[in-house]
Image (tube, rainbow, N blue to C red):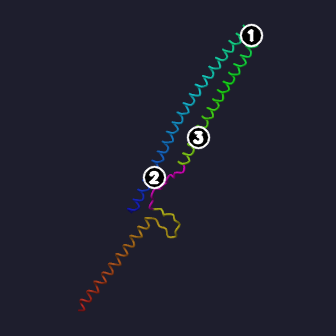
Amino acid sequence: MKDEIKRLEEQEKKRVEMQLAREAAMKAVEEKNQKNKKNVGEMKKISEKNQTIIEKKKLKEVERKKKLKDAVIETEGNGILEREKIAKTNKIIHDNVKKEKKKMVDLKKQELEIEMEKKKELIAKIRELEKIPIPRTRAYDPTETAGHGLLEEMTIIELRERLEEQKRLIAEHREKKRVEILGSIDKKKTDL
């Protein structure tokens, strides 16, 4: 009985420890998710800043082109030279815009890779949590058999009743034997 209580206490202790470990793991995952969300938010802000800078540069370039166009019109005599200058500046502007676009695409790729890594980590953690067994203990019922499939299985109550019956039979047998021994001793004393 004490062993059974001790075993039940051990099971309960293990169950509580497993529950605490699981809660700690879930809390760690939640903290990691919060940190990841914060990092993604910061990356989005940086991306938006870069986008606004690029748009401002484009507007400045459009204004500069208009000014160049107006200047070319004013100086018709130097038209060929001005066209060449405009073509060169347009090429430079085009190259700059192309570089900026490439940077933005690379930045977006990095963001997607970081997000994919975070998802993979989260999936791995969830799978680890799913591997942790959750002990499912049943309430103790002394009227149930152990369920091992043996022919002579008995419940705890039946075993206790049988034990009491055996104790009673042994006590009767001892009393009968004691009476016999006392009777034989008395008989021997009377014979002497």
Badge 2 element: helix
Q: Quadrant of residue 90?
A: top right
- Reply yes or no: does residue 133 show up in magenta: yes
Look at 74% across and 15% down and name the residue there.
83
Label 1 – label 2 distance at C-alpha: 89 Å
Residue 15: numbered disc? 2
Query: Dot 1 surroundings within 10 Å: few (below 14), some, or many (20 or more)?
Result: few
Measuring from the top left, give residue 18's x and y in whole percent.
Answer: 46, 50
Amino acid type of the residue tagged 2 in the rendering: Arg
* Location of residue 62 with respect to 35 vertically, above or below: above
Towards the viewer: 70 or 109: 70
Q: Determine which residue is flagged by label 1.
A: 78
N-term-proximal mark, 3 vs 1: 1
Q: Earlier in the sequence, mark 3 or mark 2?
A: 2
Closer mark to the observer between disc 3 and disc 2:
3
Residue extent of the magenta highlight: 130-142
SS at mark 3? Answer: helix
Nearest to the eye among marks 3 and 1: give it: 1
Q: Residue 142: horizontal and vertical position, in percent?
A: 44, 61
Query: Residue 86 in the image: x percent, y percent?
Result: 71, 16
Residue at 43% x, 68% y is: 159
Type of amino acid at the residue the image marks with label 1: Asn
Disc on res. 166: none
- Mark 3 crowd level (few <14, some 14–19, many ≥20, 10 Å Cα): few
Q: Which amino acid type is marked by label 3?
A: Glu
What main secondary structure does the magenta stretch of the protein show?
Answer: loop
Depicted 103 relative to depicted 11: above or below: above
Q: Which quadrant is the C terminus positioned in?
A: bottom left
According to the image, label 3 marks what residue?
A: 117
